[in-house]
Image (cartoon, grey):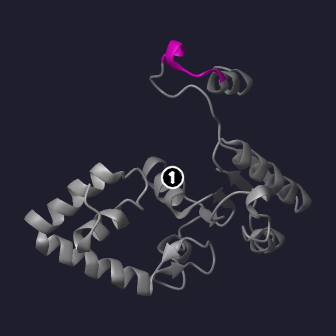
Amino acid sequence: MLKKGLLGQVIQHLCCLPGVGPKTAQRMAFQLLQRNRDNAKALAEILLKALAEIGHCQQCRTLTEQTLCEICADPARELALLCVVESPADVWTVEQATVFKGRYFVLHGHLSPLDGIGPDELGLDALEQILAKGEVKELILATNSTLEGNATAYFIGELAVKHKVQASRLASGVPMGGELEFIDRVTLLHAFKGRRNIE
């Protein structure tokens, strides 16, 4: 594949997107430059505007162009429920998939001592200040079900205990419509450990 000139640079920079390899980046570049120049220009302009104006919500740390994001500014949200997630993308996912009406706290990662990511890098001091106010009654730990995500959830759970806040973890296991023969061993193990009574 040619990597010279502006076209090659566009293709290379598109490869920085998650899940986009050289072939996909090449198709995107040709689509934008060959057939869709108006949208390419609009995309470039909105990206520059977003980079200049989008920062972090002062309360939950998600991405927003305002001081407070729409969720934190919404007086109808439940102050007693706080959901801890790893990224702003997780906030969008939960909002689209559930009827959760509480607030969020975005970590921007997970504990990873090997990568130099400790409690300070995740803003856990700010989370502890929120818990210390006494408004939060339940802390929902929605970190990823990875080794690092579980370690992060455990650490935050200890903070919740310290401030006498009930902490819960998202259930994990067999997905809706899943067939046992296609479920991996770790997922099945979590499903058995997290089983509950039939109501």
Is 181 inside the magenta-drawn segment? Answer: yes
Q: Which residue is mark 1?
A: 94
Q: 63 or 40, which is in the foreground?
A: 40
Res 121 → quadrant: bottom right
**Is 124 on the left or on the right of 104, as rendered?**
right
Give the residue type at disc 1. Val
In this rendering, the answer to whether 49 lies above or below 172 is: below
Residue at the left extreme of this rendering: 35
Count of numbered tags: 1
Is 89 inside the magenta-drawn segment? Answer: no
Indicate the position of residue 73 as horizontal and vertical percent values: 53, 77
Q: What residue is rendered at 54% in x and 85% in y?
A: 67
Q: In this picture, which residue range is highlighted in magenta?
A: 179-185
Say which quadrant the C terminus sits in. top right
Indicate the position of residue 83 as horizontal and vertical percent values: 64, 57
Q: What residue is rendered at 47% in x and 53% in y?
A: 93
